[in-house]
Image (cartoon, rainbow, N blue to C red):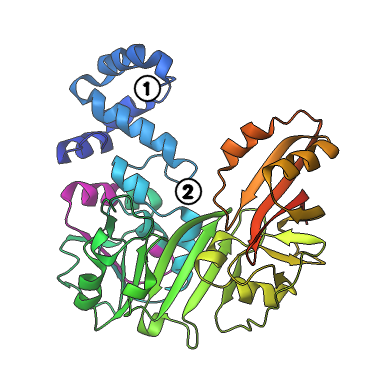
Amino acid sequence: MGYSFTLDDVAHLASDAGRAALAEVARLPLTPATHLADVAAARRVAGDRAAAVLETVLLRRRAESKLDGSAEWLFTDDALQQATATPVARHRARRLAGRAVHDVTCSIGADLAVLAGVASPVVGSDLDPVRLAMARHNARIAGVDPLLVRADALRPVSRAGTVVADPARRDSGGRRTWRPSDFAPPLDELAAAHAHVDLAVKCAPGIDFAVAPWADEVELVSLDGQVREACLWTRGLATPGVTRRATVLRHDRPDQTITDAEPDDCPVAPPGGWIVDPDGAVVRAGLVRHYAARHGLWQLDERIAHLSGDTPPPGVRAFRVVEHGPYTEKALRARLRAHDVGRLEILVRGLDVDPNTLRRRLKLAGSQEATVVLTRIGSRPVALLCRAERT
């Protein structure tokens, strides 16, 4: 859960004395091996505020890879975990540019800092007074000045024509998919409360979209290969003719997007020269066939997301097929031995195979590196031995 900050903590951390203490403690290594010495040093520097100062320094270090320009921000542990990574927040904000926007679950202001740069006016609200105080501090550091008020997300308090929300996730009880009631506030209640305006709701990518019929467009967004969020767009925020969208963000190449308005005439055929594993956002959005049609690829099996083709799309990590055949552990072991494979990446779709357990049983001893794709074509388990390459 992390340290429980108070309003007095926030006021101190934002003061000259607090900033000085934070700068001093930031010089400490703060590693498990130095924990006792670091705590003692923090107490000498910050006195009874040592816990708040230590937690803030640790959270700032975690935020460096997620939030741009946040070196002097204030966080709670939960708020930082839920905060949108800056590239994803910028992508979402582009669809809101020029609008009057109210972020009804603004938390510590990570989205507000981005929204305030493209939308006007911008209002932020939250029920938690500590997070609101942190949001005021963070907005000031970011050089923006949104209006901030304490309010319940289910009780509209502004006349903004566009509302954005990022409900907190409850414990899903171990389920792989999320339901509307797993969020606070619940998604259905949030949609009902703002039925008169354009609404954008960020939620976990594992949500069962069928139980959010009020969403006119569902967008899955990944960043550098990891699916980060789903955004549910309604009314004027949705793209006409589009109900599902996948957006792939990468630091090293231009953004890509694909929608269900594109053709999906994708054949099913035996393996070709390459195997392509579509980005997780494409898979989660149910747009594998659309992606294949765009890039001249085909499916190995209608139920499996692995695609094949003679030429992979540019800028993706694809797998050049060396050989393929029926999968059994014995046959795979012999095939790897014949190719002198000692380092093996194992990709599995459609089979009940644990890669780590299988790798130990294979007892690899060669000098070469390879990738094996284990999948199912029809009812037959198959293994495709490949070399991974960046195209």
Q: Is residue 221 above or below residue 328?
A: below
Q: Which mark is residue 166?
A: none
Q: Classify 204 as above or below 363.
A: below
Q: Is residue 270 visible in this depiction of the protein?
A: yes
Q: Secondary structure at mark 2?
A: loop
Q: Earlier in the sequence, mark 1 or mark 2?
A: 1
User: Could you classify mark 2 by the number of other residues whose Cα lies within 10 Å: few (under 14), some (14-19), or many (20 or more)?
Assistant: some
How many numbered circles are shown? 2
Location of residue 40 in the rendering, given as x and y in whole percent from the top left corner: 29, 13
Q: Residue tagged by mark 2?
A: 68
**How far across and down, in percent of the image, does residue 319 sit?**
75, 54
Q: Up-down: is 29 above or below 181?
A: above
The magenta segment is 115-137
Q: In the image, what residue type sits under mark 2? A: Asp
The answer to whether marks 1 and 2 mark residues whose Cβ atoms lie closer than 8 Å is no
Q: Which residue is mark 1?
A: 24
Identify which residue, 147 or 349, lies in the foreground. Answer: 349
Relative to residue 65, is residue 53 drawn left or right?
left
Q: CA distance from mark 1 to mark 2?
A: 22 Å
Judged left or right of residue 389, residue 304 is left
Q: Is 73 colored magenta in this rendering?
A: no
User: Extreme bottom residue here?
Assistant: 241
Q: State the residue at coordinates (47%, 40%).
A: 64
Mark 1 or mark 2, whichever is nearer to me: 2
- Tell me where residue 153 appears, x and y as whole percent: 20, 66
For label 1, the SS is: helix
Query: Which of the two residues, 232 or 106, is positioned nearer the viewer here?
Result: 232
